[in-house]
Image (cartoon, helix red, strand yellow):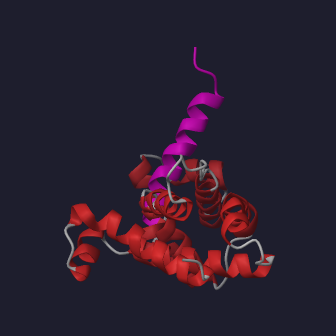
Amino acid sequence: MTTEAGPSASTRERILEVAIPLFAEHGFAGTSVRMVGQGASVNVATLAYHFDDKEGLYRACIERLYEDLSALDVPPPGPGVDPLADFVRTAWAYVRSRRTHVRLLHRHLLDRGHHHEAFRTRWMTPLLHAADPLFDGLRPDLDDTGRRLILFTSMHLLVRFVLDDPADLADSLQVDLDDLDATMVRWLTHLVRAQLAVP
């Protein structure tokens, strides 16, 4: 027999799965609770039960995004692998596979004028820790502010490219869509090397 927590949790998850892409596409103002309810096949009362109101639903969506994004794992590169290129490749693939997340987080920044409070604790701090071995190996002289600036600059550039439709980006760069990922990793790695001032 199913417990009450089971269906309740699955209803909540279903609502979040519908709400995240709607908020990413239409923003907070352009997404109504009716749209979310219709997509999740629930009524407004069910939404209110789980999230109180539209703002509560939106906050839960943003929290979920940061939970998902904080799962980035950068394993140490194998022998003979360029650690910087490997880090960029991992970050590119990770962020590209979460394009909807990135769109919503950017909408949040544009609409609200600031990052969500989880930005530092759930996203940037873990990312900095993941990048520390790379900085320690390539530029141990960089202080924490320098590391943050390079990481922020690189991530913002990476995210900017991820926001483009892949086919449009490939067309703009005049590369085959199948070569897009390798092209972007090579270029982003080159730019990060330049920022780090390493060969």
Q: Is residue 147 visible?
A: yes
The outermost residue toward the top is: 1
Magenta segment boundaries in residue numbering = 1-22
Q: Is 81 above or below relative to 88?
A: above
- Looking at the picture, does residue 99 appear above or below residue 28? above
> Along the horizontal axis of the image, is 102 left or right of 56?
left
Q: Quadrant of residue 183?
A: bottom left
Most foreground residue, 157 or 58: 157
Residue 57, x across and y down, in percent: 60, 59
Indicate yes or no whether the magenta region holds residue 47: no
Q: Residue at x 46, y 60 (%)?
A: 89
**Apparent side of residue 172 relative to residue 66 in the rendered image (left or right):** left
The image shows residue 39 at horizontal and vertical percentages of: 39, 53
Residue 156 in sight here: no
Q: Is residue 19 magenta?
A: yes
**Which residue is pictured at 56% across the width and 77% down the height?**
154
Give above or below for 63 relative to 156. above
Q: At which x and y percent is residue 33?
A: 50, 62
Q: Position of residue 100 (x, y in %)?
A: 44, 63
Question: Which of the two residues, 165 or 82, is positioned nearer the viewer here?
Answer: 82
- Horizontal placement of 1 versus 181: left or right? right
Residue 5: image quadrant is: top right
Quarter of image, res 194: bottom right
Tag count in the figure? 0
Q: The N terminus lies in which quarter of the figure?
A: top right
Mainly helix, strand or loop, the magenta region? helix
Name the side, left or right, on which 92 lies relative to 84.
left
Seen at 61% across and 54% down, the residue is 64
Quadrant in which the C terminus is drawn: bottom right
